Image: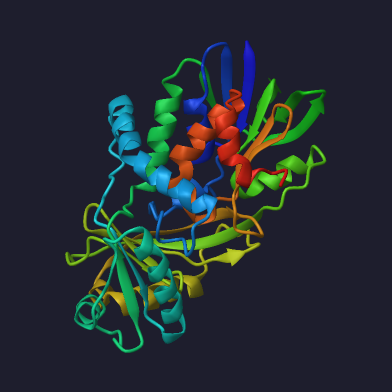
């Protein structure tokens, strides 16, 4: 029986596990389950396949493919777990509320509107209606119809519940990886709760992936990006679309009458505690966009540690025989998880087409 170990029970690790061929394979998912640090639970849940891109790249094409997969993924998870991940398809408004970002919004619109003729710029009247405090002469915005969103917390839970229903998948939470050693193409993983032998080892541990691989003498450039996030409740009913400001602040409407507001970005910061100055910035920027949200109740605040690479391009693929990695997805982990789970599983099972699709993201590049 082939023993496969996946380190990381976020959306990447669990998505890969669900897609791997179960014949002749036992899968062990190991996660230390550190509170406030899992990027999957902390995410805004945006499916920003167009929101994040300014040019046609392999990552952009992968993102567009993955967004198409999410409705089917949501339906399958609902059938398997009876959990609704709250897929919403009201679209996204990309906006620059400060003059220095207007050129970037115009540039992005020029690219995206060539690919998708349904995308449109907001007129001065529409700008004033949506962003009443914005000077229409120094702001710009456009509407993306197909960039939806899900509840990232529920999605992560549903993926895990779906995975553990499969008899060949075993989940080991609150389990710290202490040491990884290699003998030939075989791996030994010592943890706080015993040891695992792996014929196949997959590292999907977010910002910690690089640190884990150093134990095998492999240098992988991953960095943590701490983000402060808050969830508020408001009686305001005038917003269904996600709002994403070019300065990094976003507002994601959630059920019922809630709004997820994020996110600051601090590279190389491992802190798990909210920064009051960062939370204040979220308030100022979100209320500047939607003044009506000033009347609200704070549900909770939290942080997440997102993985990024120096190039901003995720790292996915085989490092050496029977050793694989999937990390560096930064703000797009939720969006990319359906396609990455499928392609990584196919790659591990020896599919050469999947290998070609993942080649631009290979750790050997």
Name the residue located 33 percent from the left edge and 48 percent from the top edge.
Answer: 150
Q: Does the rendering let one see residue 173?
A: no
102, 276: nearer the viewer = 102
Q: How many marks?
A: 0
Horizontal and vertical percent position of residue 191: 69, 30
Name the residue located 42 percent from the left edge and 86 percent from the top edge.
Answer: 99
Q: Is residue 255 left or right of residue 199?
A: left
Horizontal and vertical percent position of residue 228: 48, 63
Q: Is residue 98 left or right of residue 126?
A: right
Horizontal and vertical percent position of residue 183: 82, 23
Horizontal and vertical percent position of residue 289: 31, 76
Instruction: Give the residue furthest to the front.
Output: 114
Vertical side of 103 occupied by 51: above or below: above
Vertical side of 81 occupied by 362: above or below: below
83, 349: nearer the viewer = 349
Give the image's coloring scheme. rainbow
Q: Does the rendering let one see residue 115?
A: yes
Name the residue located 45 percent from the left edge and 26 percent from the top edge.
Answer: 163
Q: Is residue 333 left or right of residue 201?
A: left
Tell me which corner region of the image, top left, top right, bottom left or bottom right, holds residue 48: bottom left
Q: Quadrant of the N terminus?
A: top right
Name the residue located 52 percent from the left edge and 47 percent from the top edge.
Answer: 38
Vertical side of 316 occupied by 264: above or below: below
């Amino acid at each position: 029986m082939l023993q496969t170990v996946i380190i990381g029970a976020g959306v990447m690790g669990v998505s890969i596990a669900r897609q791997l061929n179960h014949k002749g394979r036992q899968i062990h998912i190991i996660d230390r389950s550190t509170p406030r640090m899992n990027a999957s639970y902390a995410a805004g849940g945006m499916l920003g396949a167009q929101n994040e891109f300014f040019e046609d790249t392999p990552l952009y094409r992968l993102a567009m493919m993955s967004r198409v997969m999410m409705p089917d993924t949501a339906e399958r998870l609902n059938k398997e777990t009876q959990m609704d991940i709250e897929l919403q398809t009201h679209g996204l408004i990309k906006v620059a509320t400060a003059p220095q970002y207007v050129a970037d919004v115009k540039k992005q619109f020029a690219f995206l509107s060539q690919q998708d003729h349904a995308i449109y710029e907001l007129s001065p009247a529409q700008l004033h209606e949506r962003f009443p405090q914005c000077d229409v002469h120094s702001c710009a915005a456009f509407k993306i119809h197909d960039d939806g969103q899900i509840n990232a917390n529920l999605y992560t839970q549903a993926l895990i519940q779906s995975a553990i229903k499969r008899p060949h998948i075993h989940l080991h939470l609150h389990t710290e990886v202490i040491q990884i050693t290699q003998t030939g193409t075989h791996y030994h993983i010592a943890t706080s709760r015993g040891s695992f032998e792996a014929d196949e080892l997959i590292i999907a541990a977010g910002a910690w992936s690089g640190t884990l691989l150093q134990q095998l003498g492999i240098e992988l450039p991953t960095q943590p990006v701490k983000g402060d996030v808050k969830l508020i409740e408001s009686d305001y009913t005038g917003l269904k679309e996600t709002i994403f400001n070019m300065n990094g602040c976003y507002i994601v409407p959630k059920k019922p009458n809630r709004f997820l507001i994020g996110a600051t970005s601090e590279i190389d910061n491992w802190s798990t505690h909210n920064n009051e100055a960062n939370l204040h910035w979220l308030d100022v920027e979100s209320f500047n966009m939607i003044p009506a949200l000033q009347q609200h109740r704070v549900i909770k605040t939290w942080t997440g540690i997102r993985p990024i690479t120096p190039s901003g391009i995720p790292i996915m693929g085989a490092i050496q025989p029977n050793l694989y990695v999937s990390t560096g997805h930064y703000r797009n982990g939720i969006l990319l998880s359906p396609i990455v789970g499928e392609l990584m599983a196919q790659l591990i099972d020896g599919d050469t087409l999947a290998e070609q699709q993942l080649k631009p993201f290979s750790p050997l590049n």
